[in-house]
Image (cartoon, rainbow, N blue to C red):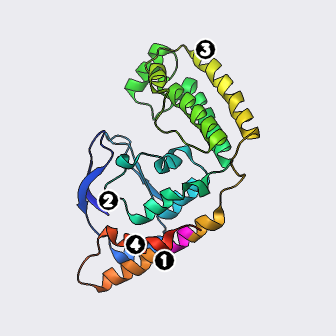
Amino acid sequence: MISNCQIEEGKGFFKGEMKWANPKEDWERLIGLSQFDNWKYPEDQALDFDVFSFRKYIGLLIKNNPTVLETLWLRDEDYCPFTSGWFHELRKNRDVFSSLRAYHAFSGYAHDQFKRMTHGATSGRMGAKRKAIVAKYGYDVKNASHLLRLYRMGIEFVETGQLNVYRPDREELLAVKSGEWTLEAVKAEAEILHERMRDAKETSILPDQPDTIAINKFLVDITWIWMKVDHLREKSSWHFPLEVLYLYKAKLVID
C-alpha cells in the first residue's frame, strides 16, 4: 500500500511512504465476494492513472489490452525502483501473453479512437479545453494521434512479437496531435494502416492464444506466496519489506 503518493513527472516512479494495508481486509478482497478489481484516479484531478488488482491485471494482459501490455515493455529505468520480484519474473516471461488476441485488441482500440476523433466532442466527459481544440481543427487531434499509434504498434507487434513503446515516429505523432495533419490525411493513413493490420494477421508469428497454463501457474503461485507472507507478517511484531518476494523468485519462473 502506498500512502502520501506523489508522481514525479517525467521520472517514471512514485515517491511515498510504504505501508501495509489491513491483512483481514486484503484477504477478503482477494477471496471473498467483494473482490477488488480496479480503481481510477478521479478525472477532475491532474494525475491520470489506474490501479488494478493482480488478477484483473493478469486478465487484461491475457486479452492483450494495449495499455496494460505496454507495462511489460518499458525500459528498466522507467519502472518504479521498488518494483517487486514477482513483477520482474512476469516481465521476463512476458511472451507467454503474446497472441493474436493483440490483433483484435489493437484494432478495436484504434477503431474506438477513430470514432471519438470526430464524434467525441458531444461527450459530457470532454472538458472545455478539449472541445476548443476540436472546434479549432474540426476533429480531436489527440484521438487521431492515438489512432495512428495504436495501429502502428499493433502491426509491429503482430508481425514481430515486439512491442515498441518508445516510438521512432514520435515526432510525426506529435505533429498529428498538434493539428498539423488534416482530417482527410489522418483518415487516409488510418485506412492504409487498417489494411496493413489485416495483412499482418495473416503472416503473424504469434500463436492464436496466450499460454494460459503457464499464466495460471504464475497467478496461483504468486497469490499463494503473498498469502503465506501476509500470514507470517500478521503474526509478527515487525513488518516484512516488499522485497521479501525476491526470496521466492526461484518459485516464480514460468516453465
Measure the alpha-carbon separation of dots 4 and 1: 13 Å
Identity, as a three-letter code, of the amino acid under mark 2: Phe
Q: Residues within 10 Å of mark 2 (few under 14, many from 20)?
A: few
Q: Residues within 10 Å of mark 1 (few under 14, many from 20)?
A: few
Identity, as a three-letter code, of the amino acid under mark 3: Glu
Whether residue 172 appears in this view of the structure is yes
Of residue 44 and residue 230, the one placed in the foreground of this image is 230
Q: Which residues are magenta?
A: 218-223
Q: Which mark is residue 26?
A: 4
Measure the alpha-carbon separation of dots 3 and 4: 51 Å
Q: Which residue is mark 1?
A: 224
Residue found farthest to the bottom? 235
Identity, as a three-letter code, of the amino acid under mark 1: Trp
Is residue 36 left or right of 210 when viewed as pictured?
Answer: left
Q: Which residue is mark 2?
A: 82
Measure the alpha-carbon separation of dots 1 and 3: 53 Å
Of residue 133 and residue 165, the one placed in the foreground of this image is 165
Q: Which residue is mark 3?
A: 184
Q: Earlier in the sequence, mark 2 or mark 1?
A: 2
x%, y% of residue 246?
A: 38, 70
